[in-house]
Amino acid sequence: MWYKYKLYRWCVLMMIIRAKFKKVNDLIYISHLDLMRLFQRALRRAGIPVKYSEGFNPHPKLSFATALTLGVSSDGEYMDVELDSYVEIQEFIERLNNVLPEGIRVLNAEYVQDKNSIMSLIRWSSYVIEIPLTEEISKENVEAKISKLLNMDEILMIKEKRKGKKITIKQEDIRDKIRDLFVLVHDNNRIVLKTTLMTGSVGNLKPELLVEALIKYTDIKAIKEDVNIHRLELYIEKDNQITTPI
């Protein structure tokens, strides 16, 4: 009977699927709330046996890593789905992708035993940021200015936080929230940067605020309204190293 107990225990522990998905094209303009609703409908249409909460108003046990700013594309979003019964990973991916709209695709998935929510685990995000320029600047000059920025003891920026109708404005040092920042592409009229920024419940820095810091603390003349941001990946911390959630 011991093997039946082990099988039962394995099944109980392995009923959470962690899935990685991308959000691109026109789907970058749907809100986080609409994204949650979209996946709830897709899971129902795909016939995925999602576990529901108990109580008067049961809801599917589905959680997302972190909200993505409206208008930002991504190849590295994550969600956890708790199931009532076992589904093969490849079947889960295929069934979901068959009913999801173009612009959202599940890229990878696996069963996880971590009881912590994916939202509580995320610590960093990596981004590619394309910045149009109003004035030409050499790559060496850009790199020098970025180096100077990163060598500052403090990078003070004004952060605005909205909760309902209440808006709180405060000054914050964002330096420790920038893990790295470097030039990927340099053209006459644009630069493309890659950066890793703190993300999640412990601390969060939006790439838009980093762009504002670049404009404020350097002589880089950017067209802020035309900046294009793409999230590459989300990361958790494990043994003092950052790694992907799956």
Image: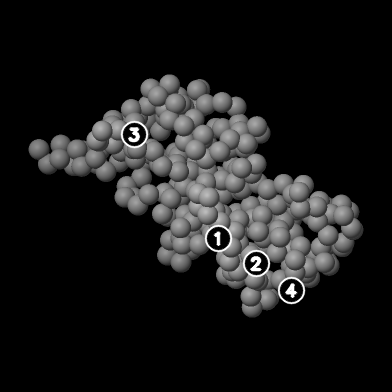
Looking at the image, which is closer to me, 238 or 206? 206
Instruction: Say which quarter of the image contains residue 179.
Output: bottom right
Residue hosting label 2: 157
Which is nearer the N-term, disc 1 or disc 3? 3
Which is nearer the N-term, disc 3 or disc 4? 3
Residue type, numbered disc 3? His
Residue found at the far bottom of this picture:
153
For image coordinates 46% across by 58% down, the residue present is: 201
For image coordinates 36% across by 45% down, the residue present is: 112
On the picture, is 59 further left or further right than 199?
A: left
Q: Is residue 65 visible?
A: yes
Residue hosting label 4: 148
Q: Quadrant of the N terminus?
A: top left
- Give the Cα distance between marks 2 and 1: 14 Å
Q: Is residue 124 visible?
A: no
- Give the Cα distance between marks 2 and 3: 39 Å
Which is nearer the N-term, disc 1 or disc 4? 4
Residue type, numbered disc 1? Thr
Which is nearer the N-term, disc 2 or disc 4? 4
- Give the Cα distance between marks 2 and 4: 16 Å
Q: Secondary structure at mark 3?
A: loop
As drawn, 28 above or below 148: above
- Give the Cα distance between marks 3 and 4: 50 Å
Mark 2 against mark 1, which lies toward the viewer? 1
On the picture, is 198 further left or further right than 228?
A: left
For image coordinates 24% across by 40% down, the residue present is: 12
For image coordinates 76% across by 49% down, the residue present is: 225
On the picture, is 59 further left or further right than 45?
A: left
